[in-house]
Image: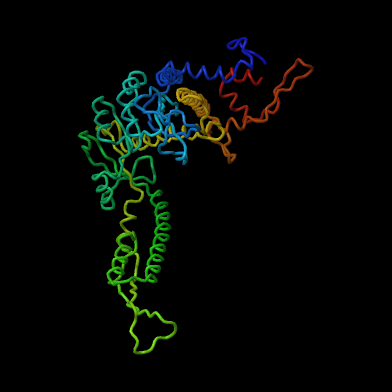
Amino acid sequence: MRTSRSGEGIQADHLNDKILGRALDSLYDAGVSDLYLHLAIKVVNHLKLPCKALNLDGTSFHVDGDYNSNDDPDDLKCIHICRGYSRDHRPDLNQVVLQLMTENEAGIPVFMAPASGNVNDKTCFQEIIKNHLSCFRAALNSHYLVADAAMYVAETLQLLDDQKQRFISRVPLNIKDAKQLVGKAPAVSLKPVEGYEDYYFAQVPSTYGDVQQRWFLFLNKKRRQSEQKTLIRKMEKQSLKEARDLEKLRKKAFLCEDDALQAFALWQKQSKLCQSGSEPEVIRKPCYSGKGRPPSDSKPDHFEYFVHGVCFVACEKKEHAQASLGYFILSTNELDQNRLHAGELLSTYKSQQQVEGGFRFLKSPDFLVSSLYLKKPERIESLLMVMTLCLMVYAAIQHRIRHELKKQSRVFPNQKKKPCQNPTARWVFFCFQGINVLTVNNQEQHVVGLKEKQLTIIQILGISYESVYS
C-alpha cells in the first residue's frame, strides 16, 4: 500500500474495527457538537461565505439494536436511543435524531447535534437557540435564522427576541390568527412578488408570542393549480367512498326506527363531503318465521327497519377546501422593510432546501449509512459527526465547482446533456468514472479516458487538480 507524508507508516491492516471504535470514542470525549462547530467555522471563513442566513432542521435515522432503549433517560449522559417518530418510515426500530444547521449559500453544515430518538423538533430547536445561538452569531455574524413551522412556538420566538436574533419562519396554519388570515385570503388584495412570476403577497402586522413581527401571506398560483388537481382526485375518491357507505347502510336491517335514524345520523356526521338532500326515510319490513309466502291473515313475528336517504356533494365544503390552496404564511421579526422585502424574504426561506438536501445526501443509498450498526450509543453520536463532516466536504466541493463555472463563464453538461452552471457534485463524481492510469514499461504513467467535460472541471479547479491528472 502506498503511503503519503500525512500518513507515514500506516498500513491497511492497521485500520481495524477496534482502532476505528476507539477513534469514535475519542471524538465523543472531545464533544462532537463543539468540535464540529470549531471545524465548520474555519471552513466557512476559508471559503469566504457571507453566511447571510442559517437554516435549521432535524431528521431521524433508524438504528438496529436495543442499545440503551430500556434505560431511564434521566440517568444517561449520552443520547437515549429509543422508539420515536421515524422519517424513514421504520417506526418498528429505535431512532436517533440529528439536528443540523447549514449556511444558506453553499449548504455547508455549520452545526450538528445528536438527540434522543423520541424528541421533537420544537424541543430541540429551543435547546439549540438557548445554548448555542450566541456562538454562531459571534463566529459567523449571520443575520437571519431560518426554520420551518416547528420553530414557530411562542416560547422559542421570545428566546430569539431576547437575544435580538432576526428570524424567518413558516407560520403553522393551526394558529387561530393564521387560520383566519388564510380563510379570508381570496378577498385580500395581493401584489406580485418582485423576481417571482407566480408568487403574490400581502403583508400584515402580528404580535404572536408577544413579539412584534411581520406576516407575509403568499400565494403560489402554479402550486395552487397543482393542488387543485390533487384535491379534486381526493374529493372524488372520498365522495365515492361515502356514497358506497350509504348504500351499505340502506341494506342493513335494524330492530327499531330509532336505531336506523341514529345510524344515518352517524354516517352524516362522519361524512366529510356528502350531505343528505332531505330527511331520511325509514321503511318497515315485516318478517315471518315460516317458509314460503305467509297467509294473508297471518301476523309477522317481528319487523325490520331500513333507512333510505339521498346524498350529494356539498358545494360549500368543496369551495371551502379549495379556498386556501396555494397559500402559506412566512413571518419575520425584521421590521425594516428596506432591509428585507417580500422577494428577499421568500428567497431566503427557500434556502431551507439546503439543509433538506443535506439530509437526502446522508440518507442516500450511495452513502451506505441508511442504518447504523455500532456497539455503544456514544459511538453513534461520533458517527453522526463523521457523516456530517462528509456532507461538509461534499457541499464545499459542489460550491467550489459552481462558483468557478460562473466566475469563468463556463458550463458543464447536466444529466439531460444540456449546459448548466450548477451541477450537483454527485453528478460530477459520476462523470469521472472510466478514467484509468496506463503504466508503460513499469515507468511512464499516463492518464487515459479523460473527456472534454472532465477536463472542464479539472481546469476550473486549478493547478493542484491539473497536476493530479497530468
Task: Measuring from the top left, give residue 94's x and y in whole percent.
Answer: 45, 34
In the figure, 129 relative to 290: above or below? Answer: above
State the image quarter where residue 239 is shown.
bottom left
Q: Is residue 152 left or right of residue 102?
A: left
Q: Quadrant of the N terminus?
A: top right
Task: Measuring from the top left, give residue 69's x and y in whole percent.
Answer: 42, 31
Q: Is residue 86 left or right of residue 176?
A: right
Residue at 27% x, 69% y: name it: 258
Query: In front here: 187 or 140?
Result: 140
Residue found at the far right of this picture: 441
Colour theme: rainbow
In the figure, 293 relative to 107: above or below? Answer: below
Task: Measuring from the top left, give residue 171's x and y in whole percent.
Answer: 30, 40
Task: Measuring from the top left, give residue 255's x and y in whole percent.
Answer: 32, 71
**How many numbered marks, from 0 up?**
0
Residue found at the far bottom of this picture: 296
Q: Is residue 115 left or right of residue 156?
A: right
In the figure, 134 relative to 364: above or below? Answer: above
Residue at 35% x, 86% y: name it: 298
State the image quarter where residue 143 is shown.
top left
Query: In front here: 401 or 393?
Result: 393
* Residue 404 seen in the figure: no
* Residue 294 seen in the figure: yes
